[in-house]
Amino acid sequence: MDFIKSNNYSIFFSDLGYKKLINLIQVNKYSKIFVHVDTNTKNYCLDIFIKKTNGLNFDTIESVPGEENKNLESCINLWSIISRKSGDRKSLIINLGGGVVSDMGGFVASTFKRGIDYINIPTTLLSIVDASVGGKTGIDFQFLKNQIGTFYEPKMVVVDPIFIKTLSKKEVLSGYAEIFKHSLIVKSKLFEKLIKQEDFYFPELRLIKESITIKNSIVLTDPNEKKERKALNYGHTLGHAIETNSLLKNKKLLHGFAISIGFVLEGYLSTELFGFPFESLEAIKNHVIKKYGKEIFSKNDISSIQELLIHDKKNSYGKTKFLLLKNFGEPVYDVEVDSNLIKKAFDFYDA
Ligand code: GLY
């Protein structure tokens, strides 16, 4: 399987991906091609892209790396450069980077001249198995993650596992959290496989494809997150609040590390409220702690995290809504949770 079909685009792997990319560019006769990088992908990935696309003519546009720069100022910078370089409605943006690059580049593409084409070439494991697939674009706003954004599909995604080799072990682990999440939200043998697996640095392509296939199947069922796609937010309600809290404290926790704690906390809520099997909850907790270690949360942290929950973008009518699980692959949508139970979830994580 060298490609996975999504709604109006496909996810292509390795060399076939670059072939399809060149073909798409020729067919669409783009007026200008902008390759959007950040400082890291400019240094470590751009040369690989140039070799693989063999003489493609493009302009580079660069963002400052890091979640703290996924904001309006960075978009203004990108819109300005694209305008200055005579970008028009027939221009193309190729996002060569992790989730920040693709979320922000996708957002810039979706709004420039009311929408131009873009392609994602994810360079982190996290963006390969999650951010680059599914057409969510966006930026953070006033310390709230993904507060402003659009649903706007790429023209294609090119997955080249070679980029994973440019990452630190910590970054690979961060991406692994999304693979692990996929094993919880659908019925499959993936969970058993993952918890038995020896430590790995470079995940097998088979595992990556299995993970993308799960994400893509959920997105296909519900592209605009009316219901089923909410399952992809498992662990993220508390995970995002934990991530933001760490940013506010200048003690940046990588996304995957934060949401993995969310899997345990929201697993506890799932067990308490919907009878998610306790032995599975313990298996999740053990796996998370084995992979990511244990974070310490003070009383102040927990209060600040609860405060941040109020602003989660998945809220409606001022209530925090959780996606919980009755069992693997059996989501329960839009659950309101008492704040005392959330405190108990932290006690369970800490025990
Ligand atoms: N990252 C969650 C989603 O794409 O819906």
Image: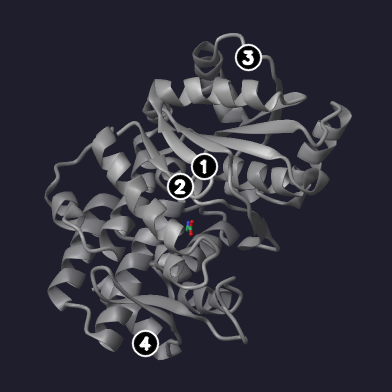
* Crowding at mark 3 (Cα within 10 Å: few <14, some 14-19, many 20+): few
Residue 202 in sight from this viewpoint: yes
Look at the numbered disc 3 and give the secondary structure of its residue.
loop
Mark 4 or 3: in front is: 3
Quarter of the image for the C terminus: give it. bottom left
What is the spatial separation of the Cα atoms under label 2 and label 1, in whole angstroms?
A: 5 Å
Which tag is nearer the camera, tag 4 or tag 2? 2
Q: Report, in whole angstroms, how far the alpha carbon at label 4 lies from the one at label 3.
A: 55 Å
- Tell me where residue 172 sits by quadrant: top left
Residue 201: tell me if it is visible: no
Question: Earlier along the polypeptide chain: callout 1 or callout 4?
Answer: 1
What is the spatial separation of the Cα atoms under label 2 and label 3, in whole angstroms? 26 Å
**Image: 199 above or below 264:** above
Circle 1 SS class: loop
Q: Are marks 1 and 4 in contact (CB under 8 Å)?
A: no
Q: Residues within 10 Å of mark 4 (few under 14, many from 20)?
A: some
Q: Which residue is mark 4?
A: 341
Cα distance in 3D space between marks 4 and 2: 38 Å
SS of the residue under disc 2: loop
Please say if the residues under marks 2 and 1 sit with CB atoms less than 8 Å apart.
yes
Answer with mark 4 or mark 2, whichever residue precedes in sequence.
Answer: 2
Residue 6 numbered mark, or none = 2
- Residue at point 64% right, 37% down? 118
Q: Is 102 positioned to the left or the right of 262 in the image?
A: right
The residue carrying mark 1 is: 9
